[in-house]
Image (cartoon, grey):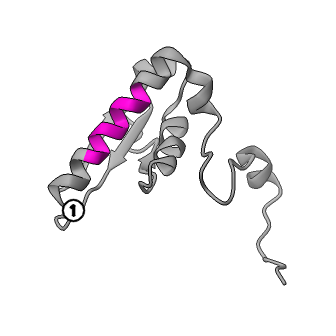
C-alpha cells in the first residue's frame, strides 16, 4: 500500500481545482497525480509514490504542495494558469476531447 487519496475540495472553493493543482505540480518537476479518482472523493487526487522514492523527494513533494496551497490562498489565478515551465502549456481539454488528434504530423 503506497498510494493515498487527498481531496482538493477546500482549494476548489478558493478558486483552484484538483486539475489545477496537478498541473502546478508539473512546474515543480513532479508527475501529475491521478485526479478525480476514486469517484467517491470530491476533487480527488491519488498520489502514488513508489517504495524507491527517497525521503528528500517526499519532503520536496510535501513542500511543493504547501507552496501550491499558499498560492491558492494568495493568488489562485497563478495555479489556474499552469504549467508554466513545461515545453507545452495547458491544453484546452474540452477541445482535445471533442477534436482529438490521433496522429502526430511532426517533421
Q: Is residue 80 magenta?
A: no
Magenta segment's dominant SS is helix
Q: Position of residue 13 (x, y in %)?
A: 50, 15
Q: Is residue 66 magenta?
A: yes
The tally of labels here is 1
Q: Quadrant of residue 1?
A: bottom left
Q: Visible in this render: residue 49?
A: yes
Q: Position of residue 60 (x, y in %)?
A: 28, 47
Q: Position of residue 18 (x, y in %)?
A: 48, 35
Q: Residue at x 22, y 45 (%)?
A: 59
> What is the magenta range?
60-69
Q: Is residue 99 above or below residue 39?
A: below
63 sits to left or right of 23: left
Q: Position of residue 44 (x, y in %)?
A: 40, 37
**Quadrant of image for the C terminus:** bottom right
100 sits to left or right of 88: right
Q: Is residue 27 above or below residue 86?
A: above
Q: Quadrant of residue 87?
A: bottom right
Q: Which residue is mark 1?
A: 53
Please state which of residues 32 and 77 is positioned toward the viewer in this rendering.
77
Q: Residue at x 52, y 30 (%)?
A: 17
At mark 1, the secondary structure is loop
Q: Residue at x 69, y 51 (%)?
A: 89
Farthest bottom residue in view = 107
Please state which of residues 100 and 71 is positioned toward the viewer in this rendering.
71
Please state which of residues 32 and 46 is positioned toward the viewer in this rendering.
32
Q: Visible in this render: residue 7?
A: no
Q: Residue at x 54, y 26 (%)?
A: 16
- Which class describes the residues within 10 Å of circle 1: few (<14), some (14-19), or many (20+)? few
Amino acid at each position: 500500500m503506497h498510494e493515498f487519496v487527498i481531496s482538493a475540495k477546500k482549494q476548489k472553493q478558493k478558486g483552484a481545482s484538483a486539475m489545477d493543482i496537478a498541473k502546478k505540480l508539473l512546474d515543480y518537476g513532479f508527475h501529475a497525480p491521478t485526479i478525480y479518482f476514486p469517484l467517491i472523493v470530491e476533487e480527488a487526487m491519488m498520489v502514488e509514490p513508489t517504495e524507491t522514492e527517497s525521503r528528500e523527494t517526499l519532503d520536496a513533494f510535501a513542500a511543493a504542495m504547501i507552496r501550491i496551497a499558499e498560492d491558492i490562498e494568495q493568488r489562485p489565478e497563478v495555479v489556474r494558469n499552469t504549467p508554466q515551465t513545461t515545453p507545452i502549456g495547458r491544453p484546452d481539454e474540452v477541445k482535445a476531447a471533442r477534436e482529438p488528434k490521433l496522429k502526430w504530423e511532426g517533421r
